[in-house]
Amino acid sequence: MSASLGAVGVGFRRRRGVPVTVVVCLVVLAAAFLAVVLGPVLYPEATKQDILSSLMPAGSPGHPLGTDELGRDILALTVAGAASALVGPVCVAVGSMLLGILLGTLAGYERGPLDFVISRWTDLLLALPVLLAAIVVSGVFGGGYWTTVALLVLLFSPSDIRIVRAGVLEQSARPYIEAAQMLSLSRWRVMFRHILPNVSSLVITNAMLNVAFALVAFSSLSFLGVGVPPGTADWGRQLTDSRSIMFDNPAAVIVPAVLIIAVACAVNLVGDWLGQRLTRSGGLA
Amino acid sequence: MTETLPTARAPRLRPIGRMLAVRVLGTLAILFVLSIVVFSMLHLAPGDLVKTLLGTRPASPEAVAAIREQYHLDDPLPVQYLRWLGGVLTGDFGQSIRLQTSVADAIGSRLGLTLALCGLAFVAAIGTGIPLGVQSAVRAGGVLDRIGTALGVIGLSAPTFAVGLLLLYVFAYYLPIFPVYGGGRGPLDTLYHLILPAITLAAGLGAIVLKLTRTAMLRELDADYVTSARARGIPEGRVRRLALRNAAIPIVTGASLLLTFLVGGTVLAETTYALPGLGTLLQDSVLFKDLAVVQALTLLVSLVIAVIALLADLAYLLLDPRVRAKGGTA
């Protein structure tokens, strides 16, 4: 889904070293990673409700970002919510990458009826709007967090399958593959030891961009009340819950909203940068 | 799909007709598969089917028998499917258990608002995305390009509801010039209520348009015909129009991308601003498990997407004389 849009920085002068924006993005991602790892340790009781301290504005003693209607501390809720908001999308991107590598390589190397079936399958999935399909399926069939992850893996996989298939098709015609086939190496060995490393840069770039898209899709779903059960610490969920108290404690809405935007932007920019680096140095020309 | 078409023995202009026929048949096939999926949704949903259909009504034996009779649940599945499909084709989507009206009425009364919202957002996105994309490509690496790129990244990365909530806060608190909630009364008031949601939607849409335009224009401006046109002293404005016409093809092909974004974005924007449109109808129906409405909306959206993808392919024929020529003479 992202491939047809091209990289962000096309046409800019290439400079040596790591650009400042990318450094900033990496810092944002590192902070998010820390929140995911340390969140449960720092704030094990983030979702504990305390009616006595409900709706305190930001800057209150003991609650730097205030509390929401149920008396949950916004800072604790936000830090603890990072895990739910970020782990799912990363799993979606990795899962869809693995599925894409398996099906894309099979389709591109084996060709024939298998290729036909896999290609029509991706056509069908690509005709579906991801968010709508996720809302309907996840909403109607219920299912919790990991069901939603599995569903999104399925819905995100077509772009991976297509990219891997195209890369494998292009590589299969090259002499080194002919040489490997002449040595009568097994099909699996040719596919995954010889071809795969040469398409890996494309795959990794697309997986990075998928993390950003999955983050948006995931938080959208939990904002709509699908995928994450009520009461969970999660950025999207937090936005739905706090929408009505926006004017009593704006921090409850603004902090998670800005965090979602910042992390998604950071992932996108790092993904684009990585893509340019990888395609320039080795891998696919 | 098009390159595999047999063209050798076909007489003039036939291939275009054949290409169209293949595309239309493919679209119908996808819609057929989707209609089966949507139909089976009712039977695959967890929980007892009769209870789902009863909704909040008490499950007396008479009511259960009435439901079984009304939905022909004792017929074999293929018969049920055909009966349902027949109803759908004549505009009968059944009853909404949540709203206690026919699904067609529920959708009809909310369609206008959603169409207006999407239309406004679309116009705003095209109106800003294309000029900004062209200018960014013409002065690639310049200040405007950098600002455009930054806006594009934010627009693409930021979820619609997050943008919506931030705008809501700014405009309700610091700049109270737009209404921030509800759909308004009367056409003009509705339009006024739609401005902020439309801007929210247009942020994501415009970013996609901007990126598509910029990438396509960069490629075109590098082409030999542009150099040759410039060398012959054709004014820069006309050269750019020429390039933009060629760049239009990848932009139009990207329309499907816009549409996929718009479908999800509308649901999010309507929910954020509490607008009574199709998006909120879908969200409420999904959460309430009002399956008849969910089925109808899913089918409706699939149909719209399929038709627009078909139209985008047709526009591709109209925009690119080469495709027509190849089809006509090969």
Image (spheres, helix red, strand yellow):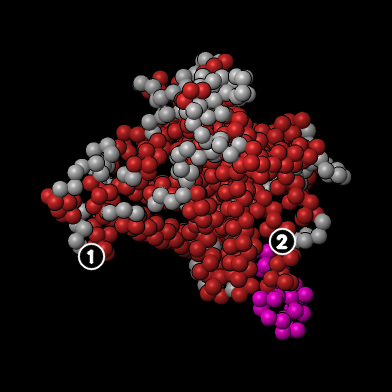
Q: Residues within 10 Å of mark 2 (few under 14, many from 20)?
A: some
Q: Secondary structure at mark 2?
A: helix
- Are marks 1 and 2 in one subunit? no
In the picture, the disc for residue A200 is 2
Residue pictured at 56% horizontal, 75% vertical: A112
Quarter of the figure with the C terminus of chain A = bottom right
Query: Separation of disc 1 and disc 2 at Cα?
Result: 49 Å
Q: Is residue A148 left or right of residue B321?
A: left
Q: Secondary structure at mark 1?
A: loop
Residue pictured at 60% horizontal, 48% vertical: A87
In magenta stretch: residue A171? yes
* Residue corresponding to mark 1: B76
Across and down, in percent, residue B196 comes to 51, 25
Residue pictured at 74% horizontal, 75% vertical: A177
Residue pictured at 80% horizontal, 37% vertical: A20
Q: Amino acid at mark 1?
A: Pro
Give the total of numbered labels: 2
| Magenta residues, start to end | A166-190
Q: Amino acid at mark 2?
A: Ser
In the picture, the disc for residue B329 is none
